[in-house]
Image (tube, rainbow, N blue to C red):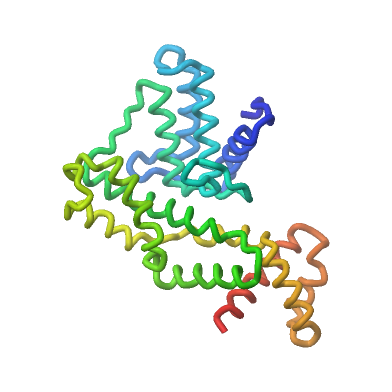
Amino acid sequence: MNALPSDSEKNKAAKRCIGRILKPDFICVDKESQLSLRQLLALSFLAIQDDTNRKATLADAQKQLIEGLYEIQRGYNLSLKNEDLGGPDMPICPGGTFNKVIQILGYIHSDCEIIFMTQQTASLKLPRVVCEEAMRYLSAFAHPQTTEELLSFVALLDQIKKEGVSVIWDKIVNRITEPMFSEFGDLYDNNKNASDFVALVDAGLYTILNNLDYFQKSIQESPAYHQYCNRFLRNFGGSFFSNTTHDLATHRQESSEAQRAYDQHFGVILARNNRT
């Protein structure tokens, strides 16, 4: 991957994806196979070089891998039409990443066969679809331009953390139903109104969204957030601040670590003020 030219956004995103997965603190192990995502990626690179069992040309296999890594890294930045909406990388969840690499392997190597055709596997896939569609929906609000939009998004995330995905269920249920029915409809006699299928989708209401904190970075990089912080400093300066707040504000431009500490501290202030 290091030899991959950086002449396209897809190549750059694929490199960032590999770099992120190879970091020591990135841990993703499939519960069934006990195979880690790093091991799966290594197998993918071996599969690409297997001239005997590779199902595609070397160039096509490499293209598929790059495309897959790009979609992993930019997952929540992509529209339903697969158009990149820009902004900081918002990768798909680890489980979705594992599935995506499996899909790549299934395309390029004869030893990999993908089977998702039982109601049990449908129920296993449902939480991943719910997670991805929820994050995709929320990503549309993750770059607020005004203070009103900022406070509204922070309040929405706070409500979801307390009450669950039901808060936005009406907004995403159709996005969940369509891909699930497209893939598993044969199991339910191709009837969206089948009671078993309706029950399957409704079970998505109990999906826990564990990665909402991922939006913290995009919020803190938004124009609205910096406007809010600057206004907070102007309106409530002086003795109102604790010593910690004052020190962070004073030294925030001295290093990236200082800026990060400042952003995190004001994130707490923002959440607290939004509840009052």
Percent across and percent down for residue 96 are: 43, 44
Residue 164 drawn above or below residue 214: below
How many numbered marks appear? 0
Residue 163 drawn above or below residue 90: below
Residue depicted at x 28% and y 34%: 115
Most distant residue in the bottom direction: 239
Where is the C terminus found, in terms of image quarters? Answer: bottom right
Percent across and percent down for residue 4 are: 64, 27
Lateral position of residue 257 relative to residue 197, left or right: right
Residue depicted at x 62% and y 40%: 16
Please identify the quarter of the rendering in which residue 33 is found: top left
Residue 5 drawn above or below residue 188: above
Q: Nearer the viewer, residue 109 or 231?
A: 231
Percent across and percent down for residue 201 are: 28, 55
Residue depicted at x 70% and y 72%: 228
Where is the N terminus found, in terms of image quarters? Answer: top right
Q: Nearer the viewer, residue 19 or 151?
A: 151
Most distant residue in the top direction: 52
Residue depicted at x 81% and y 68%: 251
Percent across and percent down for residue 149 are: 59, 68
